[in-house]
Image (cartoon, helix red, strand yellow):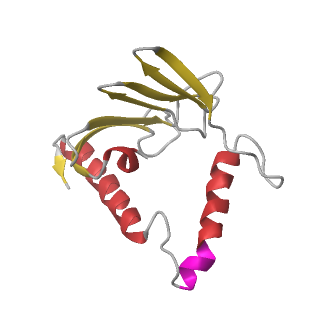
Amino acid sequence: MVRDLLGDVDRLSCEVQRRNPRVAGFDAFQALLRHGSGAVSSVECSFHSVLSPDPFPQSLLQIEGDAGTIEIVEGFRLRLHHTEGVEERDVEPPCPAWGAKPWHLIQDSVAAFQGQLPAALSGGAAMEPSGAHNIGTLAMVLAAIRSADTGQTVVL
């Protein structure tokens, strides 16, 4: 999501924690990303958080810019903060007849992928995200692990 909005990542640093003793590896991380666009972002994730209500599987987002701030908060609410005040919109995807909340967000992405597939298989369109984009995501994951292991910023 952050790459779509702010561009590819040039370098990153990452810190990890193991919060749940039943998990063999780490279950929480925070990464600081420098994008080729010049933007800086942070991404944090914890599989051990206790929140009520728990927004999982929804991703939350906040982007600050010169003209204001955009937030996606739990409950699929998009907030646009600017000098005139705050606008709020509902951006919840529809729940398909075959789906169930709160998983409809993920189910919607599966349906979108399947909708692209026939055109992609016939050569009429490219898949989004592409395989190359997914390899870029994997490179970021591996760089984050390397950064957490070494305590160093990793250049991609």
Q: Quadrant of residue 117?
A: bottom right
- Residue 82 appears in the figure: yes
In the image: residue 99, left or right of residue 93: right
Image spot of residue 66 (x, y percent) = 29, 26
Q: Is residue 42 magenta?
A: no
Q: Pick whichever, 117 or 80, lies toward us.
A: 80
Residue that lies at the very extreme toward the bottom in this rendered image: 122
> Could you tell me which residue is drawn at 32 percent across and 44 percent down?
6
Residue 96 spot, x, y in % from top left: 78, 52
Magenta stretch, main secondary structure, is helix
Say which of 48 and 77 sits in front: 77
Report the side of 136 relative to 55 (left or right): left
| Residue 41 vertical position relative to residue 155 in the rendered view, above or below | above
Q: Residue at x 20, y 56 (%)?
A: 156
Q: Quadrant of residue 118?
A: bottom right
Which stretch appears magenta? Answer: 117-122
Residue 17 in view here: no
Residue at left 20%, top 41%?
A: 38
